[in-house]
Image (cartoon, coloured by chain):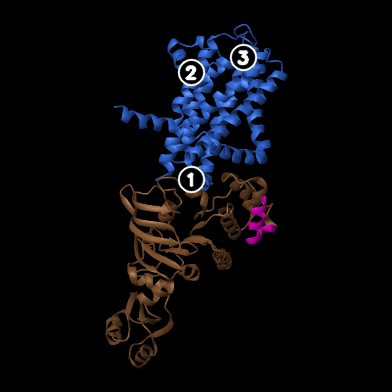
Chain colours: A blue, B brown
Amino acid sequence: MKAAATPKLYRWASYYSPVNRWALKVFTRNLFVFRKTWTTNLAFNIVEPLLYLAALGAGLGMLVEDVEGMSYTQFIAPGIVATSAMWAAAAECSYDSFVRMYYQKIYHAIVATPINLQEVVAGELLYGTFKSVLSGTVITGVIAVLGLVPSPWALLIPAVLVLNGMAFSQLAMIWTGIVPKIDNFAYFFTLIITPMFLFSGVFFPLDVLPGILQQLAWLMPLYHIVVLLRSLTLGLVSIDLVFHVLWLLVFILIIFPLPQYLMHRRLIK
Amino acid sequence: MSVVVEAQNLQKNYNGFPAVAGIDFKIQKGQCFGILGPNGAGKTTVVAMIYCFHPVSGGKLTVFGNDVNDDPRTIKKRLGVVPQENNLDLELSVRENLLIYAGYYGIKRDVAEKRARELLYFFGLSAKADQEVDKISGGMKRRLTIARGLIHTPDLLILDEPTTGLDPQSRRLIWEHLRQLKKNGLTLILTTHYLEEASQLCDDLIIMDKGVILDEGKPGDLIKKQVGTKVVEVDLEPAQKSALINSMDSLISGYQLAESTIYLFIPEDETKVMKALNNSNFAHTYQVRPANLEDVFLKLTGRGLSYEEDAGYESSSYAKTL
C-alpha cells in the first residue's frame, strides 16, 4: 500500500513545484510587454470601477438609506475594489492568455526553451495575480483619496488582493485550458464572474436574500474577499477574518493543479 | 564524428493514428540533416519529438546522448528551434524579441545584448533592431525567428519548414545564412517539402511519407540510385504510353506516368533515348533535364511532393513543386 501511495503523493506535490524561477521568467516576459502597454491597460481597469462608484454611489445611493450604519458609497467602495481586481485577473488569464496561447503561439515559443508548459501556466497565473493586485491597489488608493478608507488596517488590502488575484487567475486559466474558441469565454463571464459580481455582497448585504442564496454565496471566493476588504477598510477586524483567509487559501491550493493539467491535455498531444 | 540525435524504432500515435510508424535514423555532429516529405508525412512530429514537445509513443530517441523522456530541460538548453509558424512577440521590437528569449535561458543581460547585436548583424537586421516586429516583412520575421533560435549559441538548430511561404529571393537569402551556419560547424535539422532546398543544403536526408522512411542517403546518391542521371519528359497521347514504354524498355531504368506526361529515367546516357524518340512515330514533344529529388519522390510514392490529399488530385497526377 505504502509503495503505491508515495508516487501518487509525489505526483500531486509536483503540481506545485512549477512555481519556481522558470515561471518567474515567464512572468518577467509579460511584465516586459506590460511596460510598453500599461497606459491603456491600466486606464480601463481604473476608469470602469470609478464609473460604477460614481453611478451607484452618487446616483443610486441617493435613493438608499444608510446601509449597516454607513453611506451607500462607503458600503460599496471596498466591494468595487474587490470586483475590479477580480475582473483584472479573470480577463488577463482568459482573453489575454488565450491570445498568447492560441493566436500568438507564445506558449509554444517558450516551451522550446528550458521552460516547460507547467511553468508557463504558473508564470501566467503570477502575472494575472500581479495585474489584479495592481489594479485593486490603485483603486484602493483612489477611494482613500475620496475619503472612503477610514482605517489603517487597509494597508493589508494588497495581501488579500494576492489571494483574490490567484483565485480568479486560476479559474480563468481553467477555461483557457478548455474552450475551443475565444468566444466561449462568454460562458465563463456570464455563468461565473457576473453572478459573483452581483451576489457576493458588493451592492447589498446578503442577509436581505433568502437563506439558500446566502449559503450559496459562501461557496463563492468573491464573497470572502468582499468580507475581508470591507472589514479592513472600516477597521472592523476580528479573529473571524482568519476563517475567510483560510477558505481562500484552501480554495487556491485545491484548484491549483487543474489549469496545468488542462493546458497540458490541450497542447501536448 | 559523434552522434547528436539517434532514433530507434521511433513511433508517435495521435489517438491511435500512427503519425510516425517506427523509424530509425542517426544525425552526426556538424551535419545538415534533411527530412523531406509532403504535408502530413510526419516531419513536424519527428522534430517536435526531438525538441521534447511531443512525448514519444514508442521506441527510443536520444539527443546529445540523453533520452528525451528523462531530462528535457538539459536537452532543450542545448538546442534551438525555428518553428513552422512564426511565434514572435509582436508587441516587442526586433531586438527585444531576442533579449526576452535570452532571458528564458537565463543569459545575463550584457551577454544577451552583445549576442543580439551579433545576430542582428549576421542576419542583416541591424537597421530594423528597434522596429516593432509587426511592421517588418515576412522574410525578416523568418530571419529573426532563426536568430532567436541561436541566441543561446546552441549545438543543434532545428528548422521546421524554414522557407515555406516566402518569396524566392527571401528563400535564397535564408539558404545563404544556413549555409554559413553550417560552415561554422553548427548541426542543422531541416524539414522541408522543397526538393531544391533539400538538395542545396542537406548532407544527408531521409524521405518520409505517411510516417515511414522511404529511403535515405546523400541527395546525389539517392538520385543516382533511384533514378539515374537524366530524365526525359515526354508529352504524348495517353493511349500511346504503353507502346512507348515497350520500345524504350532496354534504354531506361524506370519511368513514371502522370496524365499526359511520361518521365523516362535514364541511367547514364540520354542520346540513345533521344535518337529512339526522334525516329519513332509518336506525335510528341520532349525535353531532357538532370534528374532531381522530386523524381526520386515521385518514383517512391507515385505522386509529387506538393500533392495534397484534400486537393482532390487523381492519385496518378503530379504537380511540380518548383
Mark 3, Cα crowd under 10 Å, few <14 / some 14-19 / many 20+, is many
**Placement of A69 over or under A49, stated as above or below:** above
Q: Chain of mark 3?
A: A
Mark identifier at residue B73: 1
The label nearer to you, 1 versus 3, is 1
| B153 or A116: nearer the viewer | B153
Query: Residue shown at 44%/10% (left/top)?
Result: A211
Mark 2, Cα crowd under 10 Å, few <14 / some 14-19 / many 20+, is some
CA distance for labels 1 and 3: 45 Å
Main secondary structure along the magenta-highlighted residues: helix
**Placement of B175 over or under B128, stated as above or below:** below
Q: Looking at the picture, which amino acid does disc 1 mark? A: Arg
Residue tagged 3: A232
Residue B296: x, y in percent?
A: 38, 72
Residue tagged 2: A247
Tell me the element at label 1.
Answer: helix
Point out the stretch of residues depicted in magenta. Answer: B113-126
CA distance for labels 3 and 2: 17 Å
